[in-house]
Image: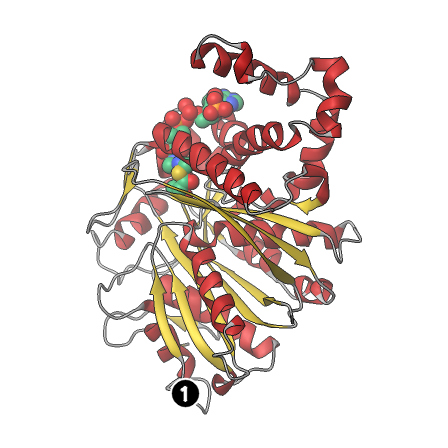
């Protein structure tokens, strides 16, 4: 069976930066360490006034198509994953295709266009749709363009405000891919939850503390389901484990709990037994509460060991490099975590071709999904082509007053004709309704 997976990736960040330690913390009366150490975030990317989910998606997609030498006729499917859509009827992919058609001779009349919604997990669901479409043999040699694009903004003074972000990830899905090949095993954990909602409103209603617990619970269920499907979860068998990353501190919690679960009954638990004992077993406790307390104590001790620390530094920390600088991109977050891990591998000259990734996606409301991927030949040149470091570096550093003004614009509370802080250069830019996505 021919491999199907990600053949190319492009990442587009919003062009403004909110520095959390220097700019945000003093205004909020908080210690910078709450953000940089506690949440693990240094800055948020925000869109300038001429940027939105369409322009970021179109700009990432155009760069990807140019780099891969593609014309519209090569693409048979465009799916956009977003939780920031502004149209309840027309999918965002039609707006993106409209932008791209301005710069190519051909058009996308033959392509199936759709929009996927299930909070942050919908980018992974769109990858699945593309994978299944190609596997079913319905693609007639064409490739799928999957774009995860969001402006992840919270109401001012909401605890989530520190975790904002904006950006798009465009991914080309094809046979014989150049970045990663998808495995067939999958695991799910899903439940009807109300911790994070956007019912016809601009900003989410969030029960932040509960959302953290729901993330962990669904992720554990997905891991168990993945194991039941025959998936390997030995933590030493993966080059990286990219998780959905609303903020790196969330991944720190998920990684500790996941590692404990995955070493149960393995050589790693055995090797650590002399140092921290064996994991508590449920049958040894009278109540769930006592058992959970013992598990918590074991996990705390486990995450202090050198074995865990070395594993975390190798397998998890590299996936957080981009996220730390750009914040939460909702649907794109797990996909920048993958790109981030591969980018670090390239920088450190790690030989990861043929090695596996375990990918943990999550969407509020709520669902987690786990699947494995294999890093394939060609990944180095694909990742080398990413210019995300240059984009991050080039962002305009907002003052707090400028941040509030821009935030109001994106909340439609202010006129959009305030001066942009950056200048569009050879890119799709939002000029207001009726002139969406004009290329500057
Ligand atoms: N130095 C070091 N650490 C510090 C510190 C300091 N000076 N001050 C605080 N901290 C630590 C805290 O101890 C805490 O760490 P732990 O969780 O490990 O204890 C961390 O910094 C954050 O502090 P608080 O818990 O006090 O922060 P908060 O309550 O103001 O906000 C939050 C945290 C509720 C998660 C908030 O960021 C939020 O609502 N975020 C949006 C929702 C979200 O992202 N949820 C994640 C799961 S849902 C999901 O993943 C979907 C999605 O994309 C939204």
Q: Look at mark 1 in the image and give the residue it sits on.
A: 107
Quarter occupied by residue 320: top right
Query: Residue 318 appears at what percent x and percent y?
Result: 65, 44
Q: Label 1's element?
A: loop
* Mark 1 CB near ligand 1 (8 Å cut): no
Q: In which quarter of the image is the N terminus?
A: bottom right
Residue 3 in the image: state x and y as whole percent.
64, 68
Density class for disc 1 (Cα within 10 Å; few <14, some 14-19, many ≥20) is some
Q: Position of residue 75 (x, y in %)?
A: 49, 80
From this view, report whether residue 34 is shown above or below residue 70.
Answer: above
| Along the line of sight, the residue nearer the viewer: 159 or 125 | 125
Q: Say which residue appears at 74% left-offset and 14% top-offset.
A: 275
Q: Seen in the image, is 298 located left or right of residue 113?
A: right
Residue 412 falls in which quadrant of the image?
A: bottom left
Colouring scheme applied when the structure was drawn = secondary structure
Q: At x 75% / y 29%, what residue is drawn? A: 267
* Left-right relation of 429 to 32: left
Residue 83 appears in the picture as rendered: yes
Ligand 1, image quadrant it occupies: top left
Q: Is residue 374 left or right of residue 149?
A: right
Name which residue lies at 53% across and 54% down.
Answer: 335
The quadrant in which the C terminus is found is bottom left
The vertical placement of 156 against 306, above or below, is below
């Amino acid at each position: 069976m021919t491999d199907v997976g990600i053949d190319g990736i492009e990442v587009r960040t919003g062009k403004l930066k909110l520095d959390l330690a220097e700019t945000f913390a003093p205004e909020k009366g908080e210690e910078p360490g709450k953000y940089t150490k506690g949440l693990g975030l240094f800055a948020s990317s925000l869109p300038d006034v001429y940027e939105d989910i369409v322009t970021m998606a179109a700009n990432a997609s155009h760069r990807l198509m140019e780099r891969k030498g593609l014309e519209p006729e090569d693409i048979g499917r465009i799916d956009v994953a977003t939780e920031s859509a502004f149209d309840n009827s027309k999918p965002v992919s039609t707006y993106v295709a409209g932008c791209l058609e301005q710069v190519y001779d051909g058009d996308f009349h033959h392509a199936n266009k759709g929009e996927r919604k299930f909070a942050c997990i919908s980018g992974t669901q769109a990858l699945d749709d593309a994978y299944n479409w190609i596997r079913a043999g319905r693609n007639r040699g064409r490739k799928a363009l999957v774009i995860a694009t969001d402006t992840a903004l919270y109401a001012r003074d909401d605890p989530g405000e520190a975790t904002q972000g904006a950006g798009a990830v465009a991914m080309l899905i094809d046979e014989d891919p150049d970045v990663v090949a998808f495995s067939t095993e999958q695991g799910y954990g899903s439940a009807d939850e109300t911790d994070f909602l956007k019912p016809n409103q601009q900003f989410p209603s969030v029960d932040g503390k509960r959302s953290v617990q729901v993330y962990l619970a669904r992720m554990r269920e997905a891991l168990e389901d993945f194991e039941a499907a025959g998936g390997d979860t030995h933590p030493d068998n993966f080059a990286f484990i990219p998780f959905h990353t609303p903020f790196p501190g969330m991944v720190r919690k998920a990684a500790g709990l996941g590692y404990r679960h995955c070493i149960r009954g393995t050589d790693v638990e055995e090797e650590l037994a002399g140092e921290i004992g064996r994991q508590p077993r449920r049958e040894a406790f009278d109540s769930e509460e006592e058992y959970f307390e013992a598990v918590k104590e074991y996990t705390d001790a486990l995450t202090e060991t050198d074995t865990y620390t070395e594993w975390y530094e190798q397998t998890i920390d590299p996936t957080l490099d981009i996220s730390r600088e750009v914040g939460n991109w909702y649907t794109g977050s797990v996909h920048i975590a993958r790109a981030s891990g591969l980018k670090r591998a390239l920088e450190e000259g790690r030989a990861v071709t043929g090695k596996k990734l375990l990918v943990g996606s999550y969407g509020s409301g709520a669902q987690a999904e786990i699947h494995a991927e294999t890093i394939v030949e060609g990944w180095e040149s694909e990742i080398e082509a990413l210019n995300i470091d240059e984009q991050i570096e080039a962002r305009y550093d907002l003052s707090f007053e400028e941040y509030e003004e821009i935030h109001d614009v994106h909340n439609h509370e202010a006129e959009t004709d305030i001066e942009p802080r950056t200048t569009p250069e050879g890119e799709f830019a939002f000029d207001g309704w009726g002139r969406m996505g004009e290329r500057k």
